[in-house]
Amino acid sequence: QAQLVESGGGLVQPGGSLRLSCAASGFTLGYYAIGWFRQAPGKEREGVSCITTNNGWTYYTDSVKGRFTISRDNAKNTVYLQMNSLKPEDTGVYYCATARVTWPSLTPDDYRNWGQGTQVTVSS
């Protein structure tokens, strides 16, 4: 059964860093573009970053550019999201998912196989 599992979330002070992992089981992650999304309480899920398959091109929403880095290790069947200079507005549940479209997208409707999410809280 295809499954994605996120990990690495936690409580961090503003300015701190976290690295999230998205591990796949039951399928080969390298065949898919992968997206990271987040959802804050009372808000809609929003796209944070995505990475394509063969060429590994990366895309970011404006609010995280220069602070977050997405990468993939196909040998480990895992995609990462390195988050630096974290801000309170980065707080939320972070999810990864596989793209069901062939173009880069940060739109949640273009993704499937969602993981259960990992909580990130940025607070002093």
Image: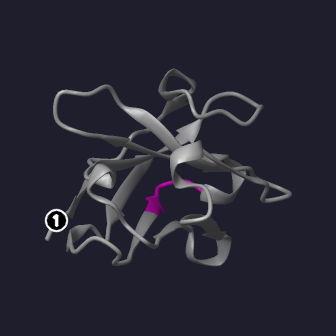
Name the side, left or right, on which 104 lies relative to 12.
Answer: right
Residue lying furthest top: 109
Q: Report x, y in % for residue 104.
A: 73, 37
Name which residue type carries label 1: Ser
Q: Is residue 70 magenta?
A: no
Residue 108 in the image: above or below residue 47: above
Q: Quadrant of residue 61?
A: top right
User: Where is residue 86 drawn, in percent x and y?
Assistant: 37, 66
In the displayed structure image, the side of residue 63 where residue 105 appears, left or right: right
Q: Is residue 37 above or below residue 103?
A: below
Q: Secondary structure at mark 1?
A: loop
- What residue is at 33 percent from the left and 78 percent from the top? 16
Q: What residue is pinned by disc 1? A: 123
Q: Is residue 81 visible?
A: yes
Q: Nearer the viewer, residue 76 or 8?
A: 8
- The part of the chain drawn in magenta is 23-28
- Residue 24, given in percent of the width and then of the height, sits at 47, 60
Few, some or many C-alpha atoms within 10 Å of disc 1 (few <14, some 14-19, many ≥20)?
some
Q: Is residue 35 visible?
A: no
Relative vertical location of residue 17 with respect to residue 37 in this rendering, above or below = below
Q: Report the number of discs.
A: 1
Could you say which quadrant of the image residue 69 lies in?
bottom right
User: Residue at left 46%, top 73%?
Assistant: 84
Please tell me whether residue 25 belongs to the stretch shown in magenta: yes
- 24 relative to 117, above or below: below
Residue 96 position, x and y percent, is 44, 49
Residue extending farthest right: 55
Residue beneath the point at 63% across and 68% down: 71
Q: Nearer the viewer, residue 26 or 105?
A: 105
If the image is split into quadrants, where does the C terminus sit?
Answer: bottom left
